[in-house]
Amino acid sequence: MTRIFQIVAANYASYYDARTLRATRYLWRITFFALAAATFAYFDFFPDDELLGYIITAVTVLAGFSFSILIYLVGLPRETAPQVSLEAENRSATREKISSELVDNVSFFNLIAVFELVVSISLATIPPSEKSLAQLISSKLHLAAPTHEWLSLVDIAMSYYSSALVFVFIFLLLEGLYTFQRLTRRVNYLFTLR
């Protein structure tokens, strides 16, 4: 668990303006994503299995792209020869710093992608609304018909559970898409330094 927090902290430490080296604000974006996810959860947006399949495929493909970026970064040759000019030395130091930060960014994106896949699969396993969870459990376990109170309690808990999953699903989807586009921009910047 500590390693997960280290990955998140290292990713957000790389949020700065490359020209001024001042930290950029990301809490507003995270707040906006959380509000958007809460709105989807409040209005009971529940993705169907087809949409979940598309999202799982897209997240898996983007994770594959990020792994190829990671392989590229690991394969980059390290410059050990002294530079002939101060500009070349600064450019080399910037490339090394961005390369190490990109490893943190890729690790963060892959962490989000794994969580997104787990949440997507969890959403896909929620039983359809026509049949309540309590009725499904009692029929599978060959129990007597559940009482009305037990039915309503389980259905209310299931409603909160599915709303929480939708919130996490939308938040991770937005954060993952933003992180991937940021990762792509930073890789392009690294290519311009080459």
Image (cartoon, rainbow, N blue to C red):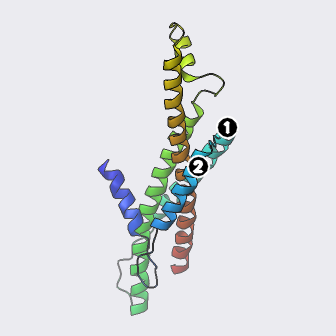
- Considering only vertical position in the picture, is 182 above or below 20? above
For label 1, the residue is 48
Mark 2, secondary structure of its residue: helix
Q: Residue at 36% across / 81% down in the picture?
A: 81
> Do the CB atoms of the residues marked 1 and 2 lie less than 8 Å apart?
no
In the displayed structure, would residue 29 be above or below residue 111?
Answer: below
Q: Earlier in the sequence, mark 1 or mark 2?
A: 1
Residue topped by disc 2: 59
Seen as rendered, the residue at the extreme left is: 2
Residue at horizontal 55 percent and vertical 61 percent from the top: 180
Answer yes or no: is residue 85 visible: no
* Amino acid at pointer 2: Val
Q: CA distance from mark 1 to mark 2?
A: 16 Å
- Residue 148 sits above or below residue 84 on the image: above
Task: Point out residue 171 in the picture as x, y percentages from the top left corner.
Answer: 53, 52
Q: Is residue 153 visible?
A: yes
Q: Secondary structure at mark 1?
A: loop
Q: Position of residue 103 (x, y in %)?
A: 43, 62
* In the image, farthest residue toward the right: 50
Closer to the camera, 112 or 65? 112
How many numbered marks appear? 2
Q: Amino acid at mark 1?
A: Asp
Q: Position of residue 35 (x, y in %)?
A: 54, 56
Examine the image and state in which quarter residue 98 appears: bottom left
Q: Who is closer to the viewer here, 34 or 108? A: 34
Graded by Cα atoms within 10 Å as few (under 14), some (14 to 19) or many (20 or more), the crowding at tag 2 reads many
Q: Residues within 10 Å of mark 1 (few under 14, many from 20)?
A: few
In this rendering, is residue 138 above or below 175?
Answer: above
